[in-house]
């Protein structure tokens, strides 16, 4: 074919091709933007500055995606979310790829394809307590470790080293657990992200421990069928690395290059290897010794810390109050018991001084500093008695000495001593009562018999009057001996179901001749008041209370008897019987003394036995007997017994 024919055909084809150009417009960057997913609030990977009014998205992943988009002549549209949200959007085709996802966050078996970038982060350990040393995974045992919710791959690793794990959903939540002492350490998948957050949010007392546990790259994640985009992104990553753009991003967001430029090692490799060989030969033994010594120091430090904590726990948990004061009189140490009792500190977070303990405690500590040891008994509060001993002790921090104080609650011991004295007193009285009753009853019987005989033989009024006086006094003496015998001889209880209200009414019927001038009020005597007890002994209590009330009014006045079911201090139901009179009342300082043996307020008319015996019977039934003196006058005797009906 000649050249002319070839040119002729080309001139025919070119116009036809030019006609097709208007139907294929050039692609523009704004026509098909790249939809990029980034992690939410993960500085420096992707985040928003809080003081930025426009709330623009910033970070390593954002800059990398924009550079890739510029290289591909396409703009980027960003979508934020957590790992699961981003993977779900990728699967549904709502985004084209995920930029800046750390490798451990990609679930096993996920239907995705990945591109490995030259950026990498390090798994690190964070602690917030200066007393905790967790430098490696071997130190996890016995500690509580906080992990992010997307660290499911690392959780079994931490638990295999003996750690107790807590799942958190943000870096800030992990920092809060460290600050509150609820977690001993916070293992983060990226020490760089954690450091950036600590710096930005100015979180105090958070520091990195040990070396990197794991180093893993940052990925670009795509759908499994998007091969063309993966190929294009892979090529652009290589070109950006060669142009030094990725190195600039590392220096911008990580603060230092994580991958050094080649050339320096190749240039000085022989010199470095020779120097390292010589240094390694010289320092091998020293390094080995240093490692062994460090391990030994760490073990000793942990042992000392455990011992210190055990000692501190023992002091804090001790029921004895323990405190120490320095030479200037400042409080150096006080356990919880000392704060609560000696210093009367109501708020655990407050810091009281020694003045809270009162003048007696200050003088005791001064005596201990001068004399070497001092003791005293301090009444604290309303019903507490403490036995306090103070002594000097050397001060480990200074050349002077401390004044130490140990106080023990002896309230129960004092009560037991009083009960022992009372028991011994009762034993002596019992033996005396048995002998007196035996020796007196026989002569009294003879006197009573002869008085009855003389009364039958004589009708003279004066003689009969004298015989009546004699008979009353013999009966009175016999009644005293019977009460003494009740104290001396143990009485067995025949427990049965009773109604305390009905029992009170029966006792009133026994005393009906003495109620002639008494205005009786039974409106508040509820029925039934079910109890379990010995009828005879409980009748003795009620009759004693009624007779005392009548005698206090000289058998003329008002008498109120009420009964209710109430809840006791332990929450159990109690049957409560109240006997109130309009008599002279009881002095406030005698409300407890009236229950003492042989204590009476009626001079020679009483013997102080009835209320003592009544309280003993009430206590044997598991109840109480007490007295009150209301402001409006009179006295109230309150008998409380456990009810046989409980909720």
Image (cartoon, rainbow, N blue to C red):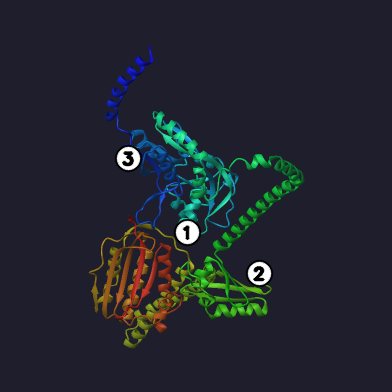
Q: Residue at x 24, y 74 (%)?
A: 520
- In the rendered image, residue 435, in percent from the top left (x then y), is placed at 52, 72
Within 10 Å of the Cα at label 2, are there few (<14), some (14-19), or many (20+) other Cα atoms?
Answer: few
Decide if residue 299 is on the left or right side of residue 319. Answer: right
Give the label on residue 202, or none: 1
Residue toward you, 95 or 425: 95
Work out whether residue 230 or residue 147 is closer to the camera in this orientation and state it.
230
- Sequence-first disc among 1 and 3: 3
Q: Earlier in the sequence, mark 2 or mark 3?
A: 3
Which label belongs to residue 397? 2
**Residue 271, relative to residue 503: is it above or below?**
above
Q: Which dot, 1 or 3, sits closer to the camera?
A: 3
**Badge 3 is on which residue?**
30
* Residue 180 visible here: no
Front position among marks 2 and 1 = 1
How busy is the neighbourhood of tag 1: few (under 14 within 10 Å), some, or many (20 plus)? few
Rendered location of residue 37, percent (x, y): 38, 41
């Amino acid at each position: 074919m000649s050249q002319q024919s070839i040119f002729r055909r080309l001139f025919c084809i070119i116009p036809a091709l030019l006609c097709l150009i208007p139907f294929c417009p050039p692609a523009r960057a704004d026509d098909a933007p790249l939809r990029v997913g980034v992690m939410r609030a993960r500085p420096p990977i992707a985040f928003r500055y809080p003081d930025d009014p426009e709330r623009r998205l910033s970070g390593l992943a954002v800059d990398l995606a924009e550079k890739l988009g510029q290289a591909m002549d396409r703009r980027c549209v960003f979508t934020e979310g957590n790992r699961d949200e981003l993977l779900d959007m990728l699967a549904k085709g709502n985004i084209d790829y995920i930029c800046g996802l750390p490798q451990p966050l990609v679930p096993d078996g996920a239907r995705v394809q990945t591109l490995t970038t030259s950026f990498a982060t390090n798994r690190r350990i964070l602690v917030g307590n200066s007393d905790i040393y967790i430098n490696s995974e071997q130190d996890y045992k016995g500690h509580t470790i906080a992990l992010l919710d997307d660290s499911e791959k690392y959780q079994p690793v931490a638990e295999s080293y003996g750690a107790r794990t807590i799942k958190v959903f943000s870096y800030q939540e992990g920092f809060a657990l460290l600050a509150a002492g609820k977690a001993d350490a916070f293992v983060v998948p990226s020490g760089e992200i954690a450091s950036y957050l600590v710096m930005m949010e100015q979180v105090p007392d958070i520091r990195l421990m040990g070396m990197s546990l794991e180093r893993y790259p940052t990925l670009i994640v795509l759908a499994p069928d998007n091969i063309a985009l993966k190929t294009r992104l892979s090529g652009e990553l290589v070109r950006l690395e060669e142009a030094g753009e990725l190195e600039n991003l590392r220096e911008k967001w990580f603060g230092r290059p994580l991958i050094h430029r080649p050339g320096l090692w190749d240039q000085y490799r022989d010199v470095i290897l020779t120097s390292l060989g010589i240094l390694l030969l010289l320092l091998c033994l020293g390094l080995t010794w240093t490692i062994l010594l460090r391990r030994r120091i760490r073990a000793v430090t942990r042992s000392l810390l455990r011992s210190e904590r055990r000692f501190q726990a023992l002091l804090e948990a001790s029921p004895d109050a323990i405190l120490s004061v320095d030479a200037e009189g400042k409080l150096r140490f006080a356990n919880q018991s000392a704060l609560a009792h000696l210093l009367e500190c109501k708020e655990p977070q407050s810091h009281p001084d020694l003045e809270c303990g009162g003048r007696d405690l200050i003088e005791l500590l001064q005596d201990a500093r001068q004399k070497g040891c001092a003791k005293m008994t301090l009444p604290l509060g309303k019903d507490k008695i403490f036995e306090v001993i103070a002594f000097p002790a050397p001060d480990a921090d200074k050349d002077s000495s401390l004044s130490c104080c140990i106080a023990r609650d002896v309230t129960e011991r004092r009560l037991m001593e009083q009960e022992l004295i009372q028991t011994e007193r009762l034993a002596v009285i019992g033996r005396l009562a048995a002998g007196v009753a035996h020796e007196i009853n026989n002569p009294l019987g003879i006197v009573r018999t002869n008085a009855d005989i003389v009364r039958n033989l004589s009708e003279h009024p004066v003689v009969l009057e004298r015989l009546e006086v004699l008979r009353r006094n013999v009966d009175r003496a016999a009644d005293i001996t019977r009460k003494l015998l009740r104290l001396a001889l143990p009485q067995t209880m025949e427990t049965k179901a009773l109604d305390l209200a009905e029992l009170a009414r029966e006792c009133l019927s026994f005393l009906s001749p003495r109620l002639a001038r008494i205005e009786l009020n039974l409106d508040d005597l509820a029925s039934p008041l079910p109890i379990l007890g010995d009828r005879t002994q409980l009748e003795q209590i009620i009759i004693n209370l009624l007779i005392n009330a009548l005698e206090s009014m000289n058998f003329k006045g008002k008498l109120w008897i009420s009964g209710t079911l109430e809840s006791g201090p332990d929450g159990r139901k109690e049957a409560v019987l109240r006997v109130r009179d309009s008599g002279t009342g009881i002095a406030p300082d005698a409300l407890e003394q009236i229950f003492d043996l042989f204590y009476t307020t009626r001079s020679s008319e009483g013997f102080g036995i009835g209320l003592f015996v009544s309280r003993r019977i009430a206590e044997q039934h598991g109840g109480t007997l007490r007295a009150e003196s209301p402001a409006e006058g009179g006295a109230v005797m309150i008998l409380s017994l456990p009810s046989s009906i409980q909720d």
